[in-house]
Amino acid sequence: MKRLLMPLFLAVAAGAAMASATVGQPAPAFTAVDTAGKTVSLADFKGKHVVLEWVNPGCPYVQKHYNSANMQATQEAATAKGVVWLSINSTATDAGDYKAPAAMAAWMQARKAHASGTLLDADGKVGRAYGARATPHMYVIDPSGRLVYAGAIDSKPSADPADIKTATNYVNQALAESLAGKPVSVAATRAYGCSVKYSSGA
Amino acid sequence: MPSIRKLLIAAASALPLLALAAPGPVVSTPQVRAELVAHAPEGVAPGKPLWLGLAIQHQPHWHTYWKNPGDSGLPTNLQWALPAGIAAGEIEWPTPQKLPIGPLLNYGYEGTVLLPVPVVVAAGFNADKLDVKLHADWLVCKEVCIPESGDFAISVPVQAATAGNKALFDTARAALPQAAAGARASAALEGETLVVRIAGLPAAWQGKALAFLPEVAGVVQNAGTPETAWQAGEWTAKLPIDPQRSAGPALMPAVLTMPGRAAGLRVEIPVTTAWPAIAAAAPLPSLGDAVVTAPMANANPVGLIAALALALAGGVLLNLMPCVFPVLSLKVLGFARQADDRRALVAGGLAYTAGVVLSFVALAALLLALRAGGEQLGWGFQLQSPAVVALLAALFTLIGLNLAGVFEFGSLLPSGWAAVRAHHPLADSFLTGVLAVAVASPCTAPFMGASLGAAVTLPPAQALAVFAALGLGMALPYLLASAWPALARALPRPGAWMAHFKTLMAFPMFATVVWLVWVLGQQAGIDGAAALLALLVALAFVGWALGSPALGSKARWGFGAASLLLLAAVLAWTLPALHEGPPAPAQAQAGWEPWSTARVTELVGQGRPVFVDFSAAWCVTCQVNKRTTLNRAEVVADLAQRRVALLRADWTRRDAAITTELARLGRSGVPVYALYAPGAAAPKILSEILSVGEVREALAELPSTPRSLP
């Protein structure tokens, strides 16, 4: 009995720590509040491709992709094709680089971001449900609600913006393939960047 | 306050600029002090120890990362600029710490760490000082992360000793993970858990609470405490798989750590089960509606038809193989005797075809069943067992002796048997078919391994269809000859020449025996080969004593009894020797090193092209390719000129890691030749029948490589 219960207990414990979305499985449902105070649910976008982007303005790797306008270009290309793009900030309120909703909205606006919405997840619920580890950490969900990509924004894990030109943008690739009705060829990669600054509670 | 902070940031960003202007041994940032250091206790000369390294002192609570940084972070990267004749190796990463950050976990270093790099001095090096330049990138994190880099330069005297940082290098060496000699490790996927089992760990580590630090990122979950247990000296860890797993390695190198020990233990763990594909399921064709269509079989009908046609053609060719031709040609010649009894001929041909096809299907079904049961097997698996090789050698010896006229089966078999054969010609034909598959099996593996490899990965029904097509192809010439009397009549009339032909056919049989003995020698060593030869001699004696038509019944009794006693004695002596022996000394051919996925990754990571030869001793095609192509002077010269690293994966014995890699390449048999170009996503697979032109062409397509290491 003990042998049976032990793995079960561990699975539950691990689930509490980092419940994780699995590539190829239905993406976890979530509801969060955006910078304007509006409630947004994943279920609102059933039938559309959805991109989730974990963002933290204080992180040099996020800055690499925003200061070079790479992230904005990726957002623009996606939303032009009817894809919903949600940028999610899971930084805890007690972390050094926490941004209040208004400041976060201003930061995104100043960088001419093309996200469909910017969600605040200071308690880390959405981040933990998806197993988001890094900023940026990218997820692509297909119209049936299945997670078809999880991982890095591109193939060159570095802080050097010069690498963007020669890197493969995995989000563009996954979206192009999924929109064309093909399976996603690179479905999981290791996200690179800063750790998500999760709150210690929850 | 803000102005001070701005000043600090300005100072910090100016530092790399200053460093760029005049690189020295030290780069300091607000988070780290990094210093390029050297250790050359006997000066700089060929064969003398020479180490370079980057010593990083972190401010309290700041850290940099290990080769597998864990959930986030990046490993420190060193790019050397060294004079000709000096080559730096890879960082010998000291044992890292676990660094938990909320629900995440990283692997890295706090405090002071030295990343040492071994350096090789070429024979001709004779400068009076060694100028070392280094560009390093590191990511330093506390709560926030800062990517930093620095340029360093030092000059190491060649004649005098450099040992000022001996303590630093000694500490790093003491923290280097030690290879766990004698450890036996394996890992198997059980659902969403990777179960790692390690036996034979050193006594000091037995029973201790160990931590598992994987060297490959993105496979198992880093955070959390896995369930571990000690039982009868074996350590078991159940590691939850990362749900967003991005790698499926056949080998999981890992470092085990225990509290109170600076140095971990390094273990290379073969993963014995295949990794499922990462969510390669096709997207639903819906436009937002929730209609779920039944999953389509991922079969490509064109591919299946092509595979069936190829199998049919391959089967026809099998008839010409040295293992099959002697048996079959005699059988066909037998037609001449009964060319007029057409019905009997056709019935015999059909029975023979049934025997061949069913035997192939049965063999394939066995293979598929074993694979479904989790065995790591591919086509050619029959020849990976010394017992099967020995049995085949015995069978071929007996057939050869029979053809040579040493004995007749008629006098050997119970007298009733001849009558059975005579009364049941169909059963006889069917059994001939079974025998033909048995004697053909050492040839199907070597010559058809690659094409059958693809078949094994098809859905079972289709896989069996491919094997049935192969059998049909093999039986086809015989079937046609039986159905077409004109063909049988066109054969030469029986006569004295048939006896000579029969004797002649004994020699290809014996040649096959030589080859089988050699294969067994690869598996069980020289003792095993000698044991098999002794067994064959005893068998030949038995065959002659009991079956020679020239012996009278008295002599037959006497010799027969003696020969059977001898056979029993030889069997008692040889059977233990026919088990898989200690690994025969790897055929260390100059320039080739043993294959492992880790080694391929490492070499490609260094920017070197890699050529992998998946081969086996029992694979004839492999041996032919080796001699006619890979060992040719112009190919060897081309390979050397392009600095291609040569790795050989030897599949003579069963090897789960190689089987997994073959499956990843879409094959289940050898030969397979894979050329990895640096930067390319997938290796280029060359054809199974290699030609000098093809190899040189593939090499010419490689991006040109720098002359010296960066």
Image: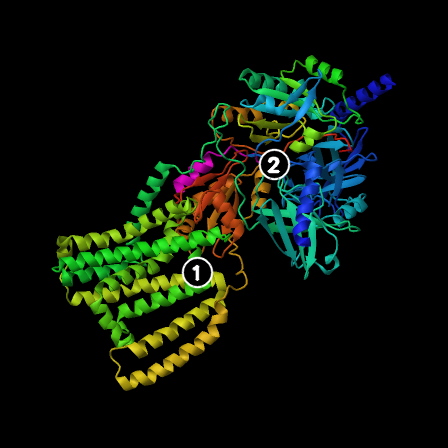
Q: Which residues are magenta?
A: B692-710
Q: Amino acid at mark 1?
A: Val
Crowding near the residue tagged with mark 2, few <14, some 14–19, many ≥20 C-alpha atoms within 10 Å: many
Label 1 belongs to which residue? B519
Quick check: can you spot residue B591? no
Residue B308 in sight from this viewpoint? yes
Q: Earlier in the sequence, mark 1 or mark 2?
A: 2
Residue B60 is covered by the magenta coloring: no
Q: Is residue B341 above or below residue B556?
A: above
Residue that protrudes farthest toward the bottom in the picture: B554
Q: Is B693 included in the stretch rendered in magenta?
A: yes
Chain of the residue that carries numbered disc 2 in the rendered image: B
Cα–Cα gap, marks 1 and 2: 43 Å
* x and y, in percent, of residue B503 in the image: 25, 67
Identify the residue position indicated by label 2 in the image. Answer: B244
User: Helix, strand, or loop for circle 2?
Assistant: loop
Q: Residue at x 63, y 37 (%)?
A: B84
Residue B528 in percent (x, y) is at: 47, 67
Residue B647 is situated, as x and y percent measured from the top left of the image, at 52, 47
Taking the image as shown, residue B265 lies to the left or right of residue B480, namely: right
Q: What is the crowding at mark 1: few (fewer than 14 residues within 10 Å), some, or many (at least 20)? A: many
Subunit of label 1 = B
**Which secondary structure, mark 1?**
helix
